[in-house]
Image (spheres, coloured by chain):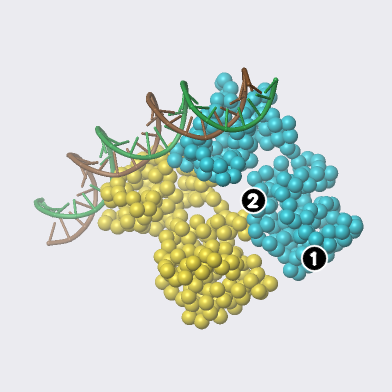
Chain colours: A yellow, B cyan, C brown, D green
Amino acid sequence: MNGKIFIIEDEPSIIQLVQHNLEKNGFIVSSSVNGNDGLKELKKFQPDLLLLDWMLPDLSGIEICKNIRKDNSIKNLPVIMLTAKGEEEDKIKGLDSGVDDYLTKPFSFNELMARIKAVLRRSNPNTVSDNLEFEDLVLDRIEKRVYRDKKEIQLGPTEFRLLEFFLANPKRVYSRDQILENVWPNNINVESRTIDVHIRRLRKSINIQNKKELIRTVRSSGYSLI
Amino acid sequence: MNGKIFIIEDEPSIIQLVQHNLEKNGFIVSSSVNGNDGLKELKKFQPDLLLLDWMLPDLSGIEICKNIRKDNSIKNLPVIMLTAKGEEEDKIKGLDSGVDDYLTKPFSFNELMARIKAVLRRSNPNTVSDNLEFEDLVLDRIEKRVYRDKKEIQLGPTEFRLLEFFLANPKRVYSRDQILENVWPNNINVESRTIDVHIRRLRKSINIQNKKELIRTVRSSGYSLI
DNA sequence: TTTAAATGTTACATTTTTGTTACAAACTAA
DNA sequence: TTAGTTTGTAACAAAAATGTAACATTTAAA
């Protein structure tokens, strides 16, 4: 993955979080905290996609979007709009102001990632790769296969999702709660110990002889790759 | 089928639709929403055919076409022009500006496909094939026949469509929903178990002794070839 | 109309996946 | 060290997904 993404969002903590995660996924990211600066920097940066906050201190997201559609040099830039919950969602749904997709805060990073990929795939099919890789581990989302050291490994559905989740941000430590939220279907209640068991199953599957352990336990925090 | 097609068209929804369908039919597709960018990207992409909108925000289709015919490196690129209904059709008919064929919007995808094939067959006979192949499996769309290991196999209509669908992207895992959407006539409601049964029928038909199973079940995800 | 083919559905057997528990082992802090 | 906490592991039962055959209904063909 190697696209460029620009963010216009006035909440620094969101920028930081999203930017950090996107960069880990191989994107090149730049950002701005208000609309006017954003529009200027946008043109310099030439992104493949724009993440745009709905409420900004100066211009609204809608206005920015209209400006973009009018400007020939960036007319076709795909835009994903970010809205706070309840913040006139319907309007956005209704308007075809050229927004390619929108997302309601708070959103999970996985969801954002999925949308980004969908939008990029539409506009620029070569930007997105559907393989997740980490060291000698390869996960093919299209064919739903996993390889370690070029040899295929059989995983159950939950193990697959679990690994997919970790691979999006290798090395990052996830708490059991975070894992639960992102890997299990919504609103499903499972004991937190369940995760340990699945981790154990995943470990069993992806470990091969003479190769190092890939899943790290961080006591009282959670798990991560490497 | 393995040609590369480039699209210059300012209406994203048309691009999306056409691109998606062409890719399903095995073409590699790239696109641009305006003339100037299009001309540049065209040369990089080296397509076997160009779908060109008549009305574009910057250059007109005609101008683009003239540019192409002047440029030695892409001089012979076949072009199919797309025109909105009533949009000076006659002019196009009359002019020999090097357009190989033209099509009036709205057009059916089947019609587009037929023209593309016709044009490609003329210019580059090897690009077009109406056979889908995968390993020792051959599906002939014209004669509606299927062969495994050179021996003909009898399939029911649904089995045929099912196999045709899988063959467009072998190895790719499709969910039952995706299969439903693409193989069954629109808006038809069938139980998702129905798919399993048809898969089973297809399997029964295409499996021959001593040959490996061709349809893979991916538990909780769907099915794929190989 | 009669007959055969194609299709959708259901029921049941089989296999796989999953969640939970119980206990052992490892770790931490006092 | 020891007590308390956290994690690893195996086993088991319950739930879910899939394969298969049989049957009823629809559609097409003769």
Chain for numbered disc 1: B
* Vertical comparison of B67 with B189: above or below: below
Chain for numbered disc 2: B
The image quadrant where one finds the N terminus of chain B is: top right
Amino acid carrying mark 1 in the image: Ser
* Vertical comparison of B21 with A115: above or below: above
Mark 1 crowdedness (10 Å alpha carbons): few <14, some 14-19, many ≥20: some
In front here: B63 or A12? Answer: B63
Residue visible at 64% across and 25% down in the picture: B154
Whether residue A130 is visible here, answered yes or no, is: yes
Query: Which residue was labeled with disc 1?
Result: B60
In front here: A62 or A57? Answer: A62
- Residue A142 at x, y percent in the picture: 54, 45
The answer to which of marks 1 and 2 sits earlier in the sequence is 2
- Residue C2 at x, y percent in the picture: 62, 18
Question: Would you identify the image quadrant in which residue C22 lies?
Answer: top left
**Residue A125 falls left or right of residue B39:** left
Whether residue B37 is visible here, answered yes or no, is: no
* Helix, strand or loop at mark 1: loop
Query: Which residue was labeled with disc 2?
Result: B20
**Residue A206 falls left or right of residue A98:** left
Residue visible at 44% across and 50% down in the picture: A164
* Helix, strand or loop at mark 2: helix
